[in-house]
């Protein structure tokens, strides 16, 4: 491929597609190249049964800290999903199971919820006092429910607990609401980016910016 353009966007994930849309608004020429056969990046849905979709990458629409009162002003994909009539549902934690698939009984659920609340209060107290520290320093790691709580934290703060900031974790999860799209997040992103012209199956082998122009 040999052509000239103002901007070359490498990768047609959500960020690349968003950049393309903005450049288009500004009247700036661009090319989007994507090594894969599809757009969407890590947002990728596969149909595992008739009209049953499974997200292989990101799955939840994070509506942000203002979601409870201003849902339409938060994550733009939430607003797009609603405008397109996509079915979305709030992600809830209504079912509790142990590691071998046995449902927790009422007492176990209460104990789990109490432990989670204690952890959240410890993290909140640390942050509000202005004394940020590692999460491992302020939660009870010997509690039998510590493992699932740590696994949950790893999704938001993918670090060892002695390196994970309590303040960082707190601000990421405080009052956030997540939604599922029943036909898959990947399909939603692909639909959103369908108006962007992308050169698929186009692998970038090198980028040379040693001269006045960039050669890809």
Image (cartoon, grey):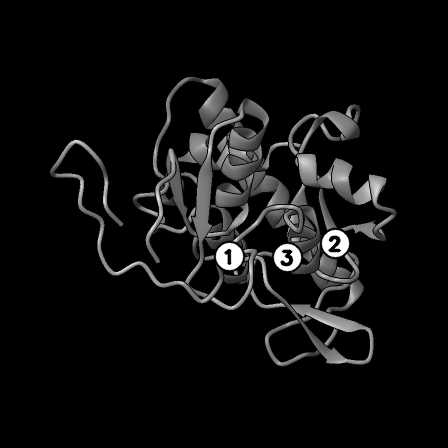
The structure residue drawn at horizontal position 48% and vertical position 28%, both measured from the top left corner, is 28
Q: Would you name the residue on which mark 3 appears?
A: 59
Say whether residue 4 is left or right of residue 200. left
Mark earlier in primary sequence (3, 1): 1
Q: Is residue 117 above or below residue 152?
A: above
Question: Alpha-carbon neighbours of circle 1 within 10 Å: few (<14), some, or many (≥20)?
Answer: many
Q: Observer-nearest residue: 191 or 76?
A: 191
Q: Observer-nearest residue: 209 or 17?
A: 209
Q: Secondary structure at mark 2?
A: strand
The structure residue drawn at horizontal position 75% and vertical position 40%, both measured from the top left corner, is 80
Label ID, residue 121: none
Q: Position of residue 171 (x, y in %)?
A: 52, 30
Q: Secondary structure at mark 1?
A: loop
Q: Would you name the residue on which mark 1 appears?
A: 41
Question: Alpha-carbon neighbours of circle 3 within 10 Å: few (<14), some, or many (≥20)?
Answer: many
Asked if marks 2 and 3 touch (Cβ < 8 Å), the reply is yes
The structure residue drawn at horizontal position 50% and vertical position 53%, both measured from the top left corner, is 155
Quadrant of the rendering where the N terminus is positioned: bottom left
Q: Would you name the residue on which mark 2 appears?
A: 180
Mark earlier in primary sequence (1, 2): 1
Asked if marks 1 and 2 touch (Cβ < 8 Å), the reply is no
Say whether residue 41 is left or right of residue 206. right
Report if residue 122 is visible in the image: no
Quadrant assignment, res 201: bottom left
Question: Alpha-carbon neighbours of circle 2 within 10 Å: few (<14), some, or many (≥20)?
Answer: some
Mark earlier in primary sequence (2, 3): 3
Q: Secondary structure at mark 3?
A: loop
Say whether residue 70 is left or right of residue 206. right
């Amino acid at each position: 491929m040999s052509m000239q353009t103002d901007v070359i966007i490498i990768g047609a994930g959500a960020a690349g597609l968003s950049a393309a849309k903005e450049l288009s608004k500004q009247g700036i020429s661009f090319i989007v190249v994507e090594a894969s056969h599809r757009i969407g990046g890590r947002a990728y849905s596969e149909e595992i049964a008739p009209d049953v979709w499974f997200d292989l990458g990101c799955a939840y629409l994070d509506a942000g800290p203002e979601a409870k009162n201003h849902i339409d002003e938060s994550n733009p994909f939430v607003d797009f999903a609603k405008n397109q009539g996509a079915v979305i549902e709030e992600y809830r934690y209504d079912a509790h199971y142990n590691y071998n698939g046995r449902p927790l009984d009422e007492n176990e659920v209460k104990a789990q919820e109490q432990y989670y609340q204690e952890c959240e209060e410890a993290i909140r107290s640390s942050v509000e006092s202005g004394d940020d520290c590692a999460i491992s320093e302020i939660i009870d790691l010997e509690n039998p429910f510590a493992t699932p709580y740590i696994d949950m934290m790893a999704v938001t703060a993918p670090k060892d607990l002695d390196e994970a900031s309590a303040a960082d974790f707190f601000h990421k999860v405080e009052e956030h609401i997540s939604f599922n799209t029943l036909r898959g997040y990947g399909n939603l992103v692909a639909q959103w980016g369908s108006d962007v012209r992308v050169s698929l199956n186009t692998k970038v082998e090198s980028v040379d910016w040693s001269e006045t122009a960039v050669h890809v």
